[in-house]
Image: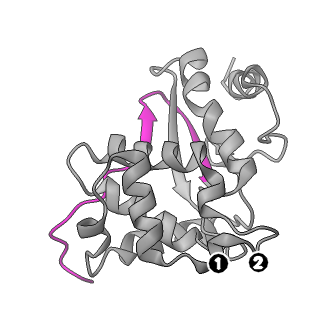
């Protein structure tokens, strides 16, 4: 086990007893749709009733998944890390076409290098990522997310776990109100 001189901030919002874990791949269009509902859901349910924990779930068919995920983790090591990471996530959500291949294989992004991906994310998010991206053992955090996904049987994203149970009825196309109803129904009467 390596001795970290850095710390990745947990990507958690809210502080309630109900825990919704959202497994996302940041360049996936369905995950982007789910991510855009995260803060409205927290507002609707209440930060004192719900904790949302983002789990980064890399998917190999999204060819920049590893680079973008590492950028999010890198941002989380900075001062105000959770908020810095969210800025990077927002940059990807708002400019997804800058980080994907057409049909997962072709298009102008095939000529893009990892350094260019980092520079794009820095420009779009306003977060200085390059130095943090270079942290030698930063991949330990990415490995933790991958291992956690595997241990929980997560194969695709977005996937939702509410209070320890996978919620197959929750999907990115659902309304925030539907998610709130599922959370409310999970609470003891």
Judge the density around disc 2: few (<14), some (14-19), many (≥20) Cα neighbours within 10 Å. Answer: few
Which residue in the protein does label 1 denote? 110
Q: Residue at x 66, y 56 (%)?
A: 97
Q: On the picture, is 15 further left or further right than 36? A: left
Q: Position of residue 95 (x, y in %)?
A: 59, 48
Element at label 2:
loop
Of marks 2 and 1, which one's residue comes earlier in the chain? 2
Q: Magenta stretch: residue 62 in it? A: no
Q: Which mark is residue 69?
A: none
Q: Position of residue 145 (x, y in %)?
A: 50, 66
Considering depth in this image, is 39 or 103 the residue closer to the camera?
103
Judge whether 5 appears above or below 87 on screen. below
> What residue range appears in magenta?
1-23
Q: Which residue appears farthest toward the left when viewing the image?
A: 5
Q: Magenta stretch: residue 17 in it? A: yes
Considering depth in this image, is 89 or 187 the residue closer to the camera?
89
Q: Position of residue 82 (x, y in %)?
A: 35, 44
Judge whether 143 appears above or below 1 on screen. above
Q: Residue at x 37, y 76 (%)?
A: 140
Q: Quadrant of the C terminus?
A: top right
Q: CA distance from mark 2 to mark 1?
A: 8 Å
Q: Residue at x 14, y 69 (%)?
A: 5
Judge whether 19 appears above or below 147 on screen. above
- Corner quadrant of residue 157: bottom right
Q: Residue at x 49, y 78 (%)?
A: 113
Q: Quadrant of the N terminus?
A: bottom left
Do labels 2 and 1 touch, CB within 8 Å? Answer: yes
Which residue in the protein does label 2 denote? 105
Element at label 1:
helix
Marks 2, 1: nearer the viewer: 1
């Amino acid at each position: 086990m390596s001795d970290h001189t850095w710390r990745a901030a947990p990507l958690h919002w809210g502080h309630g007893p109900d825990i919704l874990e959202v497994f996302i791949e940041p360049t996936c269009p369905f995950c982007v749709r789910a991510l855009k509902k995260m803060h409205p859901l927290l507002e609707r349910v209440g930060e004192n009733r719900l904790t949302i924990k983002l789990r980064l779930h890399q998917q190999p068919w999204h060819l920049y998944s590893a680079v973008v995920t590492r950028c999010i983790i890198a941002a989380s090591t900075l001062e105000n890390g959770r908020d810095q990471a969210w800025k990077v996530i927002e940059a990807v959500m708002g400019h997804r076409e800058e980080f994907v291949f057409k049909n997962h294989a072709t298009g102008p992004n095939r000529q893009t290098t990892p350094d260019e991906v980092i520079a794009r994310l820095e420009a779009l998010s306003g977060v200085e990522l390059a130095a943090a991206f270079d942290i030698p053992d930063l991949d330990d955090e990415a490995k933790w997310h991958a291992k956690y996904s595997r241990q929980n049987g997560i194969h695709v994203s977005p996937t939702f776990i509410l209070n320890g149970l996978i919620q197959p009825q929750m999907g990115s196309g659902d309304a925030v109100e539907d998610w709130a109803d599922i959370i409310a129904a999970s609470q003891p009467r």
